[in-house]
Amino acid sequence: MKRIYPWIVPWMLIGAVGLTAEPERDFVEPPIVESDRQHWAFEPISRPDLPSVQRTSWPMTGVDFFILSELEANNLGPARQADKATLLRRLKFDLHGLPPSAEELSQFENDLAADAYERLVDRLLSSPAYGERWAQYWLDLARYAETDGFEHDKVRRQAWKYRDWVIHALNVDLAYDRFVHQQLVGSEGKDPKAEIATMFCLAGPDMPDINEQDLRRHDKLNEITSTVGAVFLGLQLHCAQCHDHKYDPLSQADFYRLRAVFEPSIPQMKRDQPVHFLVRQSSSAPARFYHRGELKQPGAVVLPGVPRVAVPAGQSFECDPQSPRLGLVDWLFSDSNPLTARVIANRLWQYHFGRSLCENPSDFGVVAGGPTHPQLLDWLATELRRERWSLKRLHRTILLSATYRQASRGDGDGDIQWTQRVQRDATNELYSRFPRQRLQGEVLRDALLAVSGQLNRQIGGESVRPPLPQELLETLLKGQWTSNDNPADQSRRSIYVFARRNLRYPIFDAFDRPDGGASCARRDRSTTAIQSLQMLNSDLSLSAAKGLRDRLLASLETESPLQIQRLVESLFVRALARRPSGAEQTRFGDLLTAENDMLEENLLTACLALLNTNEFLYID
C-alpha cells in the first residue's frame, strides 16, 4: 500500500467523511482509563434532588436546601436575614458596582410589600449599569487591555469595541451559549460587525514588532488554546503545551488538537501589523504537534478536537474540519460535556459570594480542591441549562435565596449562635453567614465619584484617560497617556477608563487589578499601606470628599442644631447607606460645631474620614 505522508494531505480533506487514511503519528499519548473519568469534574451532570432539611420554612430557592442541609449536618443554623439598608447596599454594589442613593434607600425602606425585595432584584438586573459592572469580570477572564504590552505597549485603537460588546451582550441577557458562540465563531467572515466579539481570542499580549513572525503566531495560538481551556473548561491546558500534563489526564496531543481548532483562523502574521479578529481563510497549512512545544520541532499532523477525558467512554468527537470552531462550540454546550455548565455556574457563585464553590475557578483538575458543595454546583449547572443558558435567571435564583440574604455580622457579644458559627465555620465554607467582601479598585473609584455627585453615567464609546500623577507620567513614553480635557469625561465609570497593560490607573493598581497579561479568574486580595495612602491622600479621594461636602452644604438651610443633626444623618446616608447611631450623631455633631466659622473645613474632614472607613471599603 502506498504510504501517505501527513504533510501532503490537504487540510480541508483531513477528517472528511470517507477518508480512511490517518495522519502519521510520531508521538505516543497515554490512554484515558476509567479512573480518569471518575474525577468529579468529568463525571456526567445529573440534576440532584433537593436534600431534606429540618428547618423547612427557611429555604426560598433551591440553593437554600443544599446550604441548609450542610449546616444542619454540622449542627449549625443560618444567620438571620440582613436588614433592608444592608440588603440594598449589598445588591447595588453586587449588580451595579455603585452605592445606593439616599432616594433609593428611602424608597426601599418604605416599600412594605411582600415582594419588595424581588422587585428590587429585577429592577437592578434590568438596568444598563448591570452590564457595566459584570463586564469587568469577563474582561478579567478575557485578559482584556487596549495595548499590546511588552516594551512599546502600542495602542489597539478598536479594543474598546469588544468591551462595549460584552456590556451590551450582558445587558440584553444574551444566552451564554450564544455569548460564547459569538466570541469563538463570530459570523466566520460573513458580517464584519459580528467579528468584534472574536476579539476575545486575540485580546492577550502581543509583540507585532518582533522579527520572527512565525514564532509570534505560534505563541499566539498557544495562548488562545490555554485561555479557551481555562475559561470555558476549567482546565489548565497550558501545562500540556510542552509535555503531557503531570497530574491531569491531558496529553500534549490534547493541547494541539484544541489548538488545531483555531489554527485555520489565525493568518500568517506580518511585522507591525496587529491581528484583532479571527478570520476564516480559504486555505491553511495543516495543524501539527510540536515536540516540547518548540516551533522548530514540528511533528505529525493533528486533527481539530477536544480533550479526550471530557468525552464519554465509548464515544469519540472530531470537529468538522470545514468549520472547527463551530464544532467546538456545539460540543461545549452539548449534554455530553460536563465542564462548561459547571465552570460558568461556579463563576457566578464566586462573583456573588466572593469565593467559588471550588478552590480554583479555572482549574477543575485533579490537584485542585474539589467543590465544597458538589450537589449544589450540579444543581446550579442544570438550572442554567433548564433556563436556556440565561445568566440573569441564574443570578435571580441566587439573589433571591435566603443564603444570599443572610446577615454578615451578629447581634453583639451576647449572640451565642453567632459565636458558634464563627467557631465551627471559621472560614465560612458552609455559608453560615454572608461573607464580607472588599470593593475592587474600579468599584471604589465609581463609589467615590457617585457619592460626591461627580459620576458621569454616559454609556459606551471610546475609553477615557483621567489625569495621572506627574511621577507616573514620567515613567511613560511620550504620548502614552494624554488626559481628556473635558472634566465630564474624566469622571466616567471605571469600566471606560483606558486599560493600558504596562500602567494601571493608580487606585486600580493599589487594589489588585490584574494587568491583562493572562486570564484572571480570581483577583489577589492584598492589604498594603499603599491602599490606605491612596484612599487618604490621593487627588481622587480629596476631590470626592469636597464634592460630597458641597452636596451636603447645598441642602443646609441654617447652622442650627437641628440642621446640623440632619447634616450628619445625610452624610451617613450618602456615604454608607445607613443612618448614624446615637454615638456617631453626637461625635460628628461635636466635630461640625467645634469652632465658629469652621463648618466647611470640619465637614470636609468628616467626609474624608467616612470615605476612609472599612464600612465604605467593604460590602457589609
Image (cartoon, rainbow, N blue to C red):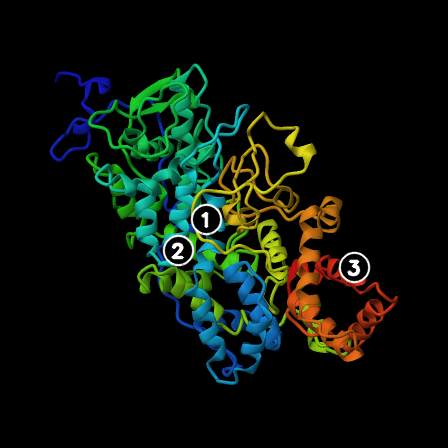
Q: For the residue carrying disc 2, how many other residues have a C-alpha within 10 Å: few (<14), some (14-19), or many (20+)?
A: many
Answer with the quarter of the image where residue 197 lies: top left
Per the model, the C-alpha gap separating discs 1 and 2 is: 10 Å
Label 3, secondary structure: give it.
helix
Q: Nearer the viewer, residue 282 or 434?
A: 282
Which residue corresponds to mark 2? 170
Q: Residue at x 24, y 42 (%)?
A: 187
> Is residue 74 in view from this perspective?
no
Position of residue 438 in the picture relative to residue 200 (left or right): right
Query: Can you give x and y, in whole percent of width and height, for residue 543 in the image?
Result: 68, 52
Q: Of callouts 3 and 1, which one flags the residue occurring earlier in the amino acid sequence?
A: 1
Res 605 label: 3
**Which one is closest to the eye, mark 3 or mark 1?**
3
Tell me the number on the disc at residue 138: 1
Q: In the drawing, what numbered circle is on residue 146?
A: none
The numbered mark, 3 or 2, whose residue comes first in the sequence reads 2
Q: Residues within 10 Å of mark 1 (few under 14, many from 20)?
A: many
**Amino acid type assigned to the residue bearing label 2 in the image:** Leu
Is there a contact, CB below 8 Å, between mark 3 and mark 1?
Answer: no
Which sits in the foreground, 33 or 376? 376
Quadrant of the drawing holding the N terminus: top left
